[in-house]
Image (cartoon, grey):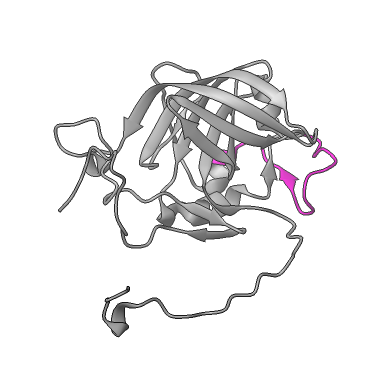
Amino acid sequence: MNTAPPSTLPAQTVTTHLEIEPSILYFGTPVVLLSTENQDGSFNLAPISSAWALGKTVVIGLGRVGQTAYNLGSRPDLVISLPAPAQWPAVERLAPLTGRNPVPPGKPKGCRFEPDKFAAAGMTSEPSHLVRPPRVAGCPIQLEARAERVQPDVSGEFVIVEAVVCKVHADSRIVVPGTDHIDPAAWSPLIYNFRHYFGLGPELGHSYRTQTPRN
């Protein structure tokens, strides 16, 4: 028998699901900026909206015809920089740019070649410690990594990259003092949600596995 007070009982609602065919499935993923090395020794910078981490490996989805996929096929060093929500305008300035010249077929309408994406986005670079591509200055988290596996996805339209992180740089303001832990209350990723940019909302709770619990 349910003895909960009436005010705490869940509302009885009826939901209706529609069968839809959305053009994309970006259901809330973090934005990352990838720095890679071009064939001539210069560097490319690209915003990516398909990335997730498993241990020290970051799995990244890329367009098959982009400069980043082209670079990682023969020069595996890269930096994965995670921008803060306030940096979304700079990320969006990168969105219509490509490092491929001429612009390859398959790129979205309005895409144009840009050799210096750092300058075009209003971002600056800073040297990495273990890899050649630079970090993106101002990004709260920067991951130096190496692509250990680059392969096409099942559709043939994309490339899946498995990159192993070899060094992590974190803004001191988002690190729990005296530890190697990111403070989740101080850090908010930039989220790409069905082609719109968001930050995080208020904390709802934490996992039983967290190492940074709060009362």
Magenta-colored stretch includes residue 106: yes
Q: Nearer the viewer, residue 111 or 155?
A: 155
Tell me residue 107's x, y (percent): 78, 44
Q: Residue at x 40, y 38 (%)?
A: 137
Q: Which residues are magenta?
A: 101-118
Quadrant of the snapshot with the N terminus: bottom left
- Is residue 51 positioned above or below 168 on the image? below
| Residue that protrudes farthest toward the bottom in the picture | 6
- Residue 131 in the figure: left or right of residue 195: left
Tell me residue 212's x, y (percent): 22, 41
- Is residue 1 positioned above or below 171 on the image? below
Tell me residue 73's x, y (percent): 68, 19
- Which secondary structure is most common in the magenta stretch? loop
- Residue 110 in the figure: left or right of residue 170: right
- Residue 198 in the figure: left or right of residue 105: left
Tell me residue 86's x, y (percent): 41, 56
Q: Nearer the viewer, residue 149 or 131?
A: 149
- Is residue 57 positioned above or below 97 on the image? above
Q: Quadrant of residue 127?
A: top left
| Residue that protrudes farthest toward the front in the picture | 1
Number of numbered discs present? Answer: 0
Q: Residue at x 48, y 33 (%)?
A: 53
- Is residue 203 positioned above or below 148 on the image? below
Magenta-colored stretch includes residue 109: yes
- Residue 94 in the figure: left or right of residue 79: right
Q: Residue at x 30, y 83 (%)?
A: 7
